[in-house]
Image (cartoon, grey):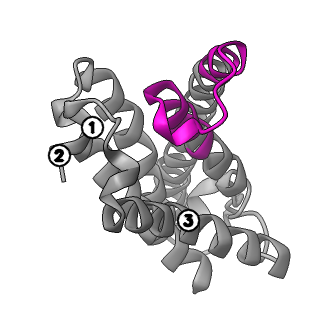
Amino acid sequence: MIWRVCNLLMSVFFSLAAYVQINDPDAAVWMVGYSIPAGLCFLVCCRPQITGQRVKVLLKSTSDGISLHRIFTVMYLIICAEWLLWRRLADLHVLVSSSFGLILAWKVYQEGITDIFQQEEGRESCGLLLTAFWLLLSRRSGRSAVGVMRVCTAAGITAFPFVTWSYYYLHSELRRHWPEHCTTAV
């Protein structure tokens, strides 16, 4: 249950992150970049088994065995298609977001920036790496019971962006050097 709530909260966070990109010069890229994980997290919240639980088809021998077999086959194919679509979309997003996140992080490192939240590249890099890490955390959560370690990690990661946003929102002096498009969305 905690795992589902964490995914719901991360879906809300990624949706908010997509929304605040509306004033960004390259808003479309960032809105897609946050909307995909928001949708994937919402799917995990609604159907936790979508991330990889194998479905076993049990057939009973009855007089209408052919029709039952067809029904189970169609159900199996639908579930496998959902699982395959979730996994491939999550894997592709992890690949792209980690690549661009690391490129942006390298740029921040090369420029010697120490306060990464004061530079747009630092915030973008953190956001991309957060989406990648969360999707990796969710990747095989449907195969077995979600353990205590994963739930504790998920709870900490879920709290971090909300606490950070609240802190920066309450302390406007921390945002005074941000570009205008970063301060007018919320």
Residue 103, image x, y percentages: 64, 15
> Who's the residue at 55% across and 65% down the image?
65
Inter-mark Cα distance, 2 to 1: 7 Å
The residue that mark 3 highlights is 65
**For residue 175, above or below residue 165:** above
The numbered mark, 3 or 1, whose residue comes first in the sequence reads: 3
Circle 1: residue type: Cys
At mark 2, the secondary structure is loop
Q: Quick one: quadrant of the N terminus?
A: bottom right
Q: Nearer the viewer, mark 3 or mark 1?
A: 1
Residue 68, image x, y percentages: 50, 65
> Who's the residue at 23% across and 43% down the image?
183
Residue 45, image x, y percentages: 47, 69
Circle 3: residue type: Gly
> Who's the residue at 41% across and 32% down the image?
33
Q: Nearer the viewer, residue 17 or 167?
A: 167
Few, some or many residues within 10 Å of mark 3 (<14, 14–19, 20+): few
Few, some or many residues within 10 Å of mark 1 (<14, 14–19, 20+): some
The residue that mark 2 highlights is 185
Residue 125 can be seen, yes or no: yes
Inter-mark Cα distance, 3 to 1: 61 Å
Q: Are marks 2 and 1 in contact (CB under 8 Å)?
A: yes
The residue that mark 1 highlights is 182
Dominant secondary structure of the magenta stretch?
Answer: helix
**For residue 48, above or below residue 3:** above
Residue 153, image x, y percentages: 74, 69
Few, some or many residues within 10 Å of mark 2 (<14, 14–19, 20+): few
Q: Nearer the viewer, residue 57 or 62?
A: 57
Inter-mark Cα distance, 2 to 3: 59 Å
Q: Nearer the viewer, residue 105 or 178?
A: 178
Q: Is residue 96 left or right of residue 177?
A: right
**Residues shaded magenta:** 103-130
